[in-house]
Image (cartoon, rainbow, N blue to C red):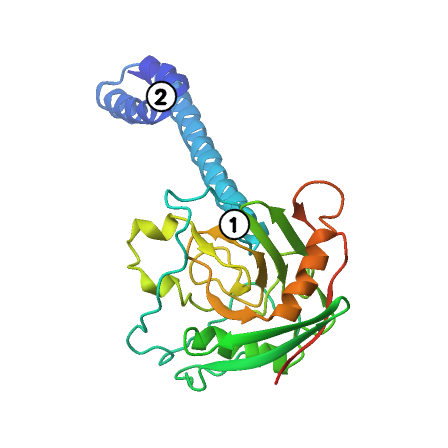
Amino acid sequence: MAIASLICAFVFAPLGIIFGHVSLSQIKRTGEEGHGLAIAGLIISYLITIGTVVVLAAAVLFTIAVARHLDDESRYSPGVTAAPSAPDSGLPEFDPPPNLGANCAYPTTTERASKPNKPPRSGRVPTDPDEISASMSTNRGDIGIQLDNDKAPCTVNSFASLAQQGYFDDTDCHRLTTNPQLGVLQCGDPSGTGTGGPGYRFGNEYPTNQYRLSDPALKTPVMYPRGTLAMANKGSGTNGSQFFLVYADSMMPPTYTAFGTIDSTGLATLDTIAAAGVDGAGDDGEPAMAVTIESIRLD
């Protein structure tokens, strides 16, 4: 048994531990030789077992750390998606869900705010007036927007709060996409990296709330029409400060809150920016014509 313990220490350490203890018990009872071999087998078995546990634990921790790092580095961005089977499929008709705007929540995130701000008020927010006018002044021209307060009151509440605090002032629009399936200018990150935010998050609204959470249609791209103002996110309930201006009909899953529209003057400004293309090569990256938001103010 002592020899078996020593052999198992190298083959399957836990079995070596069992054989080692059985061997010691047998030697103590019968007075046989092999006490040293049994002790050696036990020591080696324990060392190998502990080493294996440590290695496995390290591997698990490393995997978790990598996953968190990838999550932290993920961008709040709509991705380029294939067109759905019905290419003319657009945003669903709005059917107000029960208690719309009755319980807006803005929990703190683990990531610090990219620029100091105070979270908006939580709880019930008004859905009247239906629309709120705002003007976005940029170094490339003005962009007029209408915020759909009746469709996405929690989103509008956050956007208006940040705008009134000057959160968007003097920030760069960090991403332009000119893909045939996706034409957007993305802004709202003071860090300019595509990963920044206000230090809080909130849930999706229209059009996501027109579907059941388990509905597979949430993964099917629909057309966000030219002139849509929508929130960028990196998953359900991760809305923050980043938003994108749709200057061309774009195909995306209905998981990006549409909370406003862009006027004709703003679209003309966006067309000029888009025509200059993406910096360097490709169809997705920093705009070649640098865009800085000078201010966003409610009218």
Q: Residues within 10 Å of mark 1 (few under 14, many from 20)?
A: few
The amino acid pointed to by label 2 is Phe
Q: Position of residue 260 (x, y in %)?
A: 51, 71
The residue at 49%/80% (across/down) is: 131
The amino acid pointed to by label 1 is Arg
Q: In the picture provided, is 139 more to the left or to the right than 180?
A: right
Q: Is residue 239 above or below residue 75?
A: below
Q: Nearer the viewer, residue 198 or 262?
A: 262
Disc 1 from disc 2: Cα separation:
34 Å
User: Could you say which disc has been placed on residue 214 in the image?
Assistant: none
Q: Is residue 55 above or below residue 45?
A: below
Q: Is residue 216 visible?
A: yes
Q: Is residue 79 above or below residue 257?
A: above
Q: Position of residue 299 (x, y in %)?
A: 61, 85
Q: Position of residue 88 (x, y in %)?
A: 41, 50
The residue at 43%/63% (across/down) is: 237
Q: Which residue is mark 1?
A: 68
Q: Earlier in the sequence, mark 1 or mark 2?
A: 2
Q: Secondary structure at mark 1?
A: helix
Which quadrant is the N terminus positioned in? top left
The residue at 67%/79% (across/down) is: 166
Q: Position of residue 220 (x, y in %)?
A: 38, 48
Q: Secondary structure at mark 2?
A: loop
Q: Which residue is mark 2?
A: 12
Q: Nearer the viewer, residue 190 or 13?
A: 190
Q: Is residue 74 visible?
A: no
Q: In the picture provided, is 30 more to the left or to the right than 262?
A: left
Q: In the picture provided, is 152 more to the left or to the right than 226?
A: left
